[in-house]
Amino acid sequence: MTRAPLGRWNEQLNVSLWSMGTTASAAPQPVSVASPLESVHGNAMADSKQSLCMSPFQTVNIHNNKAKSIITNKVAPVVITYNCRQEFQIHDDILKTNYKVGRISDTLPEHYLVQGEYFMVQDVYSKADVLNTTGSYGVPNFRQVKGSYPLYGMGQPSLTGFKQVLQRLQAQGQEVIFVCVREEPVVFLHKDNDFVPYTPRRKENLHENLHDLEKEERVESLELTIRKELHDFAKLNENVFYVYNDIEFFKDEPQKISITCEEDIHVTEEVYKRPMFTMPAYRLYYRLPLPTEGAPLEEDFDAFVNILRESPSLSLGPGASQKLPALLFSCQVGVGRTNLAMILGTLVDQAIALCSEMHNIKEAIYENKSKLEGIGEDYQIQGSSTKDYFLNRTMQSLERYFYLIAFNAYLHEQYPLAFVSNFSQWMCCHAWLYRLLACMDLSELSYLAPDVLSTVKEMKAVNFRRVPKMPVYGVAQPTSEATGAVLAHLTDEKRKHTHVLWVNLQEELVLEGNGQIFAEILQAQKWLEVILEQEKQMKMFKTCLTVQEIFNQHKSSHQGLVCKRIPLPDCSAPREEDFDKLLEGMKSSLAEDSHSAFVFNCSNGKGRTTTAMVVAVLTLWHFNGFPEFAEDEIVSVPDAKYTKGEFEIVMQLVRLLPDGHRMKREVDTALDTVSETMTPMHYHLREIIICTYRQIKSGKTEKECQQLLLKSLQYLERYIYLILFNTYLHLEKKDSWQRSFTLWMEQVAARAGVYDILNQLGFSEFENPRDTPLARLRCRWQQQNILSLPFRGEFI
């Protein structure tokens, strides 16, 4: 509250004043909290209601005998007491937040909620101190790594406890670099001659901190906002705010905390930086927010390396001091994130063994894996699948271990070079690591295709088509009968192909039963069950063939038939090694017969088939010569720029590549050529990029919007990879493509910054790519392998 410049007011004021929409009355006016509105959380156990109704001033509960006059206007409400010695004006900042009140249960009192929904809970409970170090060291779970390394970890300290640890380390003659690895907001409240940490918690789980907060707002800023709120709440309630210490039994809860000024509340930065003025050995403080589960982001590793580089006592030069400073890490209870940070700090191979007094990362993988495999029939906990929960925990533990290995490899390479490259750049130069990371979940997926091109009657095959004037064909997954019909078509007197390379692009499990193609049904809970909806019984197969067996049936009558299975991911770009396999297959076929025919199929003959056909067209052009390209047509239709593939990220790549405009134009011509017969499918790779992105606006749920965004980015990435592959074909042609595309991407393209472009993939014309994790290689490539089948069997 701020004092209002009201001037002198007559104590005997007995009339109502009407001026500029302002009403004042001498009569005592009761002001109470608004009547209950709809519960924020929709249940009686956490009754919450709006504290603002018609007038925002109704947040203030002022006793009738104190208020002589209440003035409300568009600027701010004003209170004048009866003796005219106190004049209050409610500051506008208080009103903006639309404060809410709530309670944890019907038996507990109602009070204001932080940020409109959170309860303030004491951060560390006594049982969390497993090592029982609070009494001796002043902080929970204080420990040093095994061996002689000056690396320490601890749980969240109070102000007094933190000073006690610093004094102990200073007495040992050590300089101290302290790193707080918490990502959640923490504030310290004045209690018993100390400042004790409290954190905001959701009512659904009072034991769990806030995670995955908006990255736009730094956690330090959020702490300042919370401090301002707590101070305002206390002013509205006689300098008292309610907090919770016992969230197990709620004995004597909530507790009253006295807050008379903002100095009664400290934020993390104040607690950790102020001791620098009085303790010479305490040199540096950093806040490095790390996730509670899974691996940190690449920029988190970069920030950690910067800490090492910026610390004089960690100098890499020849004159570096022999005595290392003490690296002190802290999270909430001093276990998961602290342990991870301590491992990072050791910079040696045996880090995990040295730091595992409380938490071993490798053991966490096996523990979660055992729990996952031990679940028989799946069941729900708080609305979520138990199998999904432990599968996610296993994957997160494995990802964290994976990144520690990668980071250790980075340190071995870059430490002697004084970290000339940061970890993000190093990962982009070793993008195969992202491919490896994306393959941790290898569930099956199925898709059954409609015959959009109506080719079943003529060819027995779904969506059969040919690239005009070229021996390149596409088709959906054929039956044995359809395969025979296609082969007969290719080897007849008109076409006379004696050598046929047939490439199956499906990564799904596929069988032919009774002359029909079957794939595993997504919703099936048991393997390979095909259920008749009417009879609810197993369907009996008289014949059952694998894809390989289908082709083996025809090899005797078609001696020149060569079959390969090169699984491509649906929607997204082929992997680097997939391009190599396609190219090698074509080179071998052309070496044997320059008039070979090439047939590609996926589930529906659309996305993956089209991609492989474009690869084949580009390859044949490089072997046989490029056709004359017509001049670009001037197109005047909505999104014409984007249907031509002229996205900002694509043009950035074009500027980077040698003769980039030509590389793109040749790919565009190949796409147009392949898509010439596909009009009924409404599928053209360039057009479907922007069409899919535009659909996001009409998405009904957040999940649907994210899926559409992912798919549009995957289509965009597929287009970019085709341009990169065409560039590779041009530049490596002189050596007959002896260097693989995979090696070329790693040795040439990565060095030029191609993976840096792919690591910020997005539609910068419409939004900032940094706003979505899907712009990153790491997240995007992992998502393309996250499928919807339930977990079965063992986690390998």
Image: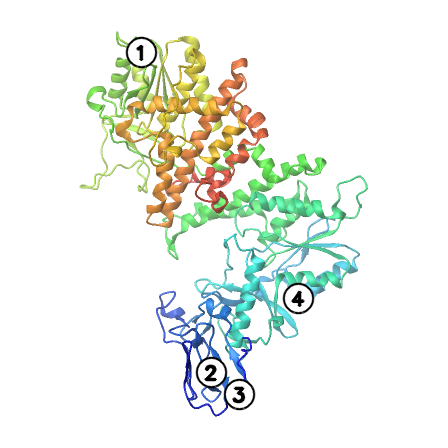
Q: Is residue 607 left or right of residue 658?
A: left
Amino acid type, mark 2: Ile
- Image quarter of residue 419: top right
Task: Please determine whether, in this image, residue 610 is positioned above or below residue 203.
Answer: above
Within 10 Å of the Cα at label 3, are there few (<14), some (14-19), or many (20+) other Cα atoms? some
Q: Quadrant of the N terminus?
A: bottom right
Distance from Cα at disc 1 to Cα at disc 3? 105 Å
Asked if the residue under mark 4 is in contact with the one under mark 1, i.e. CB atoms within 8 Å, the reply is: no
Residue denoted by label 2: 62
Disc 1 vs disc 3: which is toward the camera?
A: 3
Q: Secondary structure at mark 2?
A: loop
The disc at residue 558 is 1
Q: Is residue 147 left or right of residue 488?
A: right
- Asked which colour scheme the image uses, the reply is rainbow
The disc at residue 84 is 3
Q: Earlier in the sequence, mark 1 or mark 3?
A: 3
**Where does residue 286 sit, x and y in percent of width and height?**
65, 54
Amino acid type, mark 4: Leu
Amino acid type, mark 1: His
Residue denoted by label 4: 159
Residue at 67 percent of width and 65 percent of height: 161
Residue 482 visible in image = yes
Distance from Cα at disc 1 to Cα at disc 2? 94 Å
Distance from Cα at disc 2 to Cα at disc 4? 35 Å
Q: Earlier in the sequence, mark 3 or mark 4?
A: 3
